[in-house]
Image (cartoon, rainbow, N blue to C red):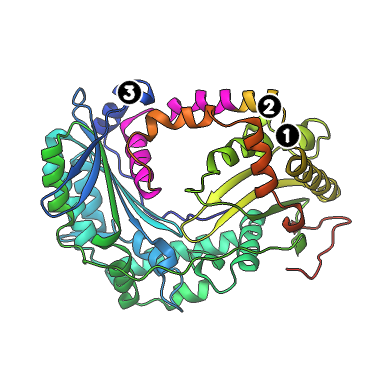
Amino acid sequence: MSLTFTMGRRVTGPLIAAAVSLWLALPAAAAVDIQQVETPMGFKAWLVEEPSIPFTALEIRFRGGAALDAPGNRGATNLMVGLLEEGAGAYDAQGFAAESESLAASFSYDSNQDAVSVSARFLTENRDEAAELLRQSLIEPSFSEAAIERVRAQVISGIRSDAKDPSSIASATFDSEVFGDHPYATDPSGTVESVSALTRDDIVDAWKGAMAKDRVYIAATGDISPEELSALIDTLLADLPETGAPMPEDVDVETQAGVTVVPFETPQSVALFGHKGLKRDDPDFFAAYVMNTILGGGGFEARLMNEVREKRGLTYGVYSYLVPMDHAELCLGQVASANDRIGEAIDVIKDEWAKMAESGVSEEELEQAKTYLTGAYPLRFDGNGPIAGILVGMQMDGLTPDYIATRNDKIEAVTLDDVKRVAARVLKPDALRFVVVGQPEGVESDDAG
């Protein structure tokens, strides 16, 4: 499911690249020491202090994202985020890029349906100057007409490209069917028409609505003390609006089993399939996570990959995944196959979905999934940038700092009975909806979509 469209150039100086390469791993994940910092202005942040390399990664995330777009202004948040480094304060776009390069600082800006993300990487010796440049991009973006037209053209080019991409078409069709009139129903990038109509005032409104103090989450990793981080955060964010735009309502996902076919001239059809999932804070989430690893999230060892690819040669890859968003939750999957074989692939997926819902998994599958999940987890902590991203994501998910140390224990605690119970609860063969983009032979649309 395509939920993210990134605008923004990443500027990386040679010194910062060297710092990244020098510190590629902390100790085992369980040893990560998270300090909780509260600034005099009331901002809260998590910090993993590592002074051995004079380099810091900072992650700032604002809850809400493109789902906050005002009616009729779809794509405004995405376009706004793409403009944050296209001139700020005293700098135009070229000046901002040149100053970033001279400081060996890296800034990137991103948005999806649920969040606006800001990532910064800077050396200790240039921390104050880098923070000031970042502050200007957050608090004093220029939104010049020239920059708006340049980035608007880039966004529209991306929208037109997506309109010719089977995977993007499948995602857009599925979202439209599932989410109705909710913002999730439409692409966060907007349409050619909506983006073309956006004014500078619309972009300013999107900036004020998305980037506010009442929805910010912060994490940092590297050569910075709690006191230094506190001062830096207050300097960066003091002038943000106090409150942003209201959040959208939640969606209760409802689907009917069946198929929607979107005709598209291509030798290979793409199918997106799924139904309602479960929330990230659901007590059954870990059992469902293990279950999905066995079903389609565990690479070549997963059932779907084994049955659809290995045994029958119907595809190069088939996957399933849990998607707990802020206002809805899905259990999804995707497969691509030749037009004359996609029907068989769909039938196999349906069968495997139903088998696991009815019978659960074997002890061998469960132990194999646990080994995979617990062994792979520490590998995520492979640098200060990824660690800062993990920390800010944990905050947004409502997790506590001890999660890193206890996460694998939660995986190990999942039993065979847990997986069987959750498979019966989560997997819904009678609600499994397929969207197929291509020229599938022997596959026809029903009227349930």
Is 426 displayed left or right of 67 in the figure? right
Q: Magenta: predominant secondary structure element?
A: helix
Q: Is residue 362 visible?
A: yes
Q: Inspect the magenta stretch and tell me whether residue 364 lies in it.
A: no
At x 52%, y 52%, the residue is: 279
Where is residue 265, by image quadrant?
bottom right
Where is residue 321, by image quadrant?
top right
Which stretch did the figure color magenta?
370-397
Q: Residues within 10 Å of mark 2 (few under 14, many from 20)?
A: some
Mark 2 in CB contact with mark 1 (< 8 angstroms): yes
Is 357 displayed left or right of 36 in the figure? right
Q: CA distance from mark 1 to mark 3?
A: 34 Å
Q: Residues within 10 Å of mark 1 (few under 14, many from 20)?
A: many
In this view, 157 is above or below 384: below
Q: Amino acid at mark 2?
A: Glu
Mark found first going from the N terminus, 1 or 3? 3
Mark 3, residue position: 31
Mark 1, residue position: 303
Q: Amino acid at mark 3?
A: Ala
In this view, 328 is above or below 389: below
Number of the label disc, if any, that sits on residue 365: 2
Q: Inspect the magenta stretch and tell me whether residue 372 lies in it.
A: yes
Q: CA distance from mark 2 to mark 1?
A: 9 Å
